[in-house]
Image (cartoon, rainbow, N blue to C red):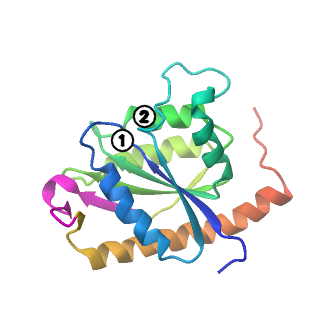
């Protein structure tokens, strides 16, 4: 373990009533807590709904989110799949924040129907590339509506396989987060326009 923990922001992307995102994020947070390299912050977009009209600076009501993203060394976006993509709440969050993503790794936990949210992840990879972030190849996904997650215990149907996939994702995030944090400290990331 590093002397300074990796600041991991877990972002709950859905803001819909009755969403499964809280349940999935809670399980993922508990799994991430077992990994000794992370200090975890949960950012729930339902707590701070971003305004749809974008201006040059994030508004004051988004200050807690902005601070959490700024402090993060790595991110995990917990996203459902809506209409073969990710929800507008995540796009709004990304659009309100630009420099906070630069030179940082982003992982994904997705959920949905038969595709288990995989199309949301693939769409998000393109957006995060534009933000100069590094997305992890491996991710964790659940077919919420096909019984992969939930039930009375609110756990994955195959806890062992899901825990293994989560460890792979967290290991990748740690591998990227540490050298990128060091690089950002030595040489601030520059974007030429």
Question: How would you rate the neighbour count of disc 2 (Cα within 10 Å): few for under 14, some for 14-19, many for 20 or more?
Answer: many
Residue 171 position (above or below residue 60) = below
Visible residue check, residue 183: yes
Depth check: give the residue in front, 154 or 114. 154
Residue 14 is marked as: 1
Secondary structure under tag 1 reads loop
Q: Looking at the image, do the residues carrying marks 2 and 1 touch, with CB atoms under 8 Å apart? A: yes
Residue 188 image position (x, y, % from top left): 81, 50
Residue 16 image position (x, y, % from top left): 30, 36
Visible residue check, residue 102: no
Quarter holding the N terminus is bottom right
Residue 141 image position (x, y, % from top left): 32, 60
Residue 16 position (above or below residue 72) = above
Where are the magenta residues, as a range?
139-153
Residue 56 is marked as: none
From the viewer's perspective, is 152 left or right of 166?
A: left
Give me the residue at 69% from left, 41% from top. Answer: 99
From the viewer's perspective, is 183 left or right of 16?
A: right
Q: Quadrant of residue 130?
A: top right
Secondary structure under tag 2 reads helix
For label 2, the residue is 89
């Amino acid at each position: 373990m590093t002397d300074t923990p990796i600041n991991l922001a877990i972002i709950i992307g859905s803001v819909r009533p009755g969403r499964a995102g809280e349940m999935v994020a809670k399980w993922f947070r508990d799994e991430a807590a077992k990994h000794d390299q992370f200090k975890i912050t949960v950012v729930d977009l339902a707590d701070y709904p971003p305004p749809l009209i974008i201006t040059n600076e994030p508004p004051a009501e988004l200050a807690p989110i902005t601070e959490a993203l700024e402090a993060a060394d790595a991110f995990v976006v917990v996203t459902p799949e809506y209409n073969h993509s990710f929800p507008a709440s995540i796009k709004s969050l990304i659009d309100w924040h630009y420099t906070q993503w630069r030179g940082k790794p982003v992982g994904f936990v997705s959920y949905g129907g038969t595709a288990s949210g995989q199309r949301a992840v693939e769409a998000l990879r393109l957006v995060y590339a534009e933000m100069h972030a590094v997305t992890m190849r491996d991710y964790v996904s659940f077919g919420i509506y096909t019984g992969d997650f939930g039930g009375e215990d609110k756990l994955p149907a195959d806890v062992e396989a899901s825990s293994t996939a989560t460890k792979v994702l967290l290991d990748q995030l740690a591998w990227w987060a540490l050298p990128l944090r060091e690089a950002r400290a030595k040489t601030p990331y520059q974007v030429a326009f």
